[in-house]
Amino acid sequence: MSEMKYIFGPVPSRRLGRSLGVSPIPHKTCNYSCVYCQLGRTSLLTNTRTEFYPVDEILNELKSVVSGKVEFDVVTIVGEGEPTLYSDLGALIGGIKGITDKPVAVITNGALLADKSVARELLEADIVMPSLDASNEQQFKQINRPHGRIKYENMLKGLIEFSKLYKGELWLEIMLIKGMNDDLESLNAFSVILKNVTYKRVYLNSPVRPPAEKDVFESEKEQMAKAVELLGGTPINMLCSGSFHSGISDDFEALVSIIKRHPMNQFEIMGFLQSRKCAEPEKFIERLNTTEYVVAVNYKGYSTYRMRNRYGSE
């Protein structure tokens, strides 16, 4: 299969299983610039919904992948930033449902749930997975660093109202960061907020891949345990994930197509290449180290590879 522009994977998801990804927006285009983002800092901070790519092009590429009999559990609209910024999201969800009967999930930061048109489009998805990383405006600005037009109160109101209307599976994710939102006062505040949200699951996450900013650290085990107790959530690190896959025939291009949307550490890269029966996978690591648009970030004693932003920095 030739290079894919919009479809990637399946990639292993600890929540969704084998996730076939759909990316309808340009790299690092978002209305947040979260301090923990595994893709690095946001390149284009915008809150304007745009038809970045023709929906028919995306759907035709998906048809091609699905016709190849690749095995997957869910189609996930996740993008390389915030997918609800794609103005044809409703048509995209509907089109995907016309191609496959597998569930359609949308991973979103939740910032635009207060927009009635966004909420209406998302009602057609089988699973919606919004983030809620802050218990107040101060944390919101510190952690999510939203576009100037986005206010915490409006974002939270949109989430609560959407949750009451939505008939599918709403899975919340809270990213807990050491010293920012994992103290007892914050956890109690999250507990109060969750009483107003209608959801099926709440996942508790903490940065395990290199974050956008260097002063961002995983929540301590004791604090995560306290969060589980108070919020009744499932720690994502307790879930299992599988292996990566790409339909692109060229091993290096397949590797880059995944890294562009989902940073991979050195062990994941080796496992992916070995699963493709690639000879001398070490040479691909060497090639990544000399590829100008890829950066290796040392984190927790091993290297994780992700794309540089448009300005050439991490």
Image (cartoon, helix red, strand yellow):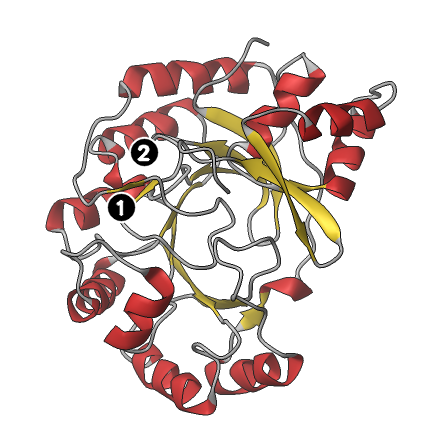
Say which residue label 1 marks.
Answer: 122
The kind of secondary structure element at disc 1 is: helix
Q: Are marks 2 and 1 in contact (CB under 8 Å)?
A: yes
Q: Residue at x 24, y 29 (%)?
A: 91
The quadrant in which the N terminus is found is: top right
Residue found at the far right of this picture: 280
The kind of secondary structure element at disc 2 is: helix
Q: Residue at x 33, y 44 (%)?
A: 82
Using the rendered image of the protein, determine whether residue 246 is visible from the camera's viewpoint: no
Q: Is residue 1 above or below residue 58?
A: above
Q: Position of residue 10 (x, y in %)?
A: 59, 32
The mark found on residue 93 in the picture is 2
> Between residues 74 and 223, which one lies in front from this camera angle?
223
Q: Position of residue 235 (x, y in %)?
A: 59, 69
Which amino acid does the dot numbered 2 rest on?
Ile
The mark found on residue 110 in the picture is none
Q: Residue at x 49, y 13 (%)?
A: 64
